[in-house]
Amino acid sequence: MTEESKYRDKFPAKNPDGTNKIDLDSHKFIKVWQGPNHPGITGNMSLELDLQGDEVMQCKTHVGYLHRGFEKLMERRRFIQCFPICVRIAVPEPDFNEYCLSASFEELAGIEIPEAAKWMRTLLLEMSRLQSFLMWMGGQAGSFGIGVVGQWTNYARDLVLDRFEEISGGRIYHMHMTPGGVRGLPPTGFENRMEETLQTIEEIMKDVKDTLFDNTIFKKRSIGLGVIKPEMVEPYGITGPNARAAGIPKDVRKDYPYLKYPELDFDVLTAENSDAYTRAELRRQEIHMTIDLIRQIMAKMPQSGDYMAKVPNVLHWQIPRGETYVRAECTRGEYGYYTVTDGSGYPRRINVRGPSYTHAVALMEKMAIDVNIADTAGLMVSLHTYPPEIER
């Protein structure tokens, strides 16, 4: 079968008089590689596109070889040595990997972490959600040619990273959550500095709304682009804002409560139209919800007390045989770790469930069909994926 014959059902057969129809036997399809050219949002992911004119006929996803093989690397290291590896599976939000891996080890080892550690972990996860959303917002605007928004939101993200640096000493990879709890509580004066950061982000988001969401060009290009129908959510394993924008209220924080989320006041935000514009607008609202959650956490979190449970010597730690699945709601949806131990000092098997595989491969390859090549970048970013989760 020729490459062109795959598309016979898309175009009518040639008329007997040879007019107004495409002759697929003589028509040529152009193959174009797009990307990687959107750093930090879709990273080193590229698309292999077959085009007819400027319209996509077929899309294949290639995630590259920058980060890969994390699961097998962790199976060959002691439990504590897995943490510098796991954070690189989702670079813009590494803390969800820290939490899921720590919680899975704790569950299998029968360790209960202190209350202060639970609050601290909840704070770190919401801070990670906030900076990841801000990074994504700039990437979504940039994919439609509105680069100034990325300048604003990346500045706002840097302010959140400053707060991470105060807590952990690291801006990107924090490794502040370890089996048994956390490495420390916030320093003196942190609450005031965090509040200043949140207020600054709220002011920036006003400009983002005016410049991006009230922008006629952005509306014309994103409304109707990449519609996810509600009936697609379960078959494609769609989670997070991509599912909620289709009206499906899926949120692990509510469906499978963990840490201190049951003590926080928030609702699952949903929308209906489920196109690129709707997904962006929903994420804009979630940024404000995350800011509110951080304020709630700061008001309730203990300023002192135990933050680390007793754990064995981590270099000689042997966790009893068992298996578990721990999940969390990351910026893009359900994030989970399936962990198996065999009684030795090493994990027997670790399998990471990230949203990127279903969103970037199965979903993107389907939704790109019939899209103008100028809009493929915007569509790709609207699904919010991180390639290392796929090549893990």
Image (tube, rainbow, N blue to C red):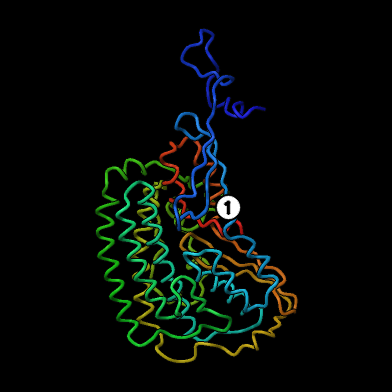
The residue labelled by disc 1 is 64
Q: Which of these two is toward me, 206 or 111?
A: 206
Q: Is residue 90 above or below residue 27?
A: below
Q: Which of these two is toward me, 162 or 229?
A: 162
Query: In percent of the image, x 25 and y 58: which residue is there?
Result: 207
Res 101 quadrant in image: bottom right
Query: In percent of the image, x 47 and y 51: which residue is there?
Result: 383
Q: Is residue 248 above or below residue 47?
A: below
Q: Which of these two is toward me, 189 or 49?
A: 49
Q: Is residue 12 above or below residue 210?
A: above
Q: Position of residue 99 (x, y in %)?
A: 54, 74
Q: Position of residue 356 (x, y in %)?
A: 54, 55
Residue 268 located left or right of residue 257:
left
Res 373 quadrant in image: top left
Q: Crowding at label 1, few (<14), some or many (≥20) Cα neighbours within 10 Å?
A: some
Res 285 quadrant in image: bottom left
Circle count? 1
Residue 219 located left or right of residue 38:
left
- Identified by mark 1, the residue type is Gly
- On-image quarter of the C terminus: bottom right
Q: Position of residue 369 (x, y in %)?
A: 50, 37
Q: Which of these two is toward me, 1 or 73?
A: 73
Query: In percent of the image, x 40 and y 66: which residue is there?
Result: 131
- On-image quarter of the N terminus: top right
Return the residue found at the far bottom. Answer: 305
Q: Position of residue 166 (x, y in %)?
A: 39, 80
Secondary structure under badge 1? loop
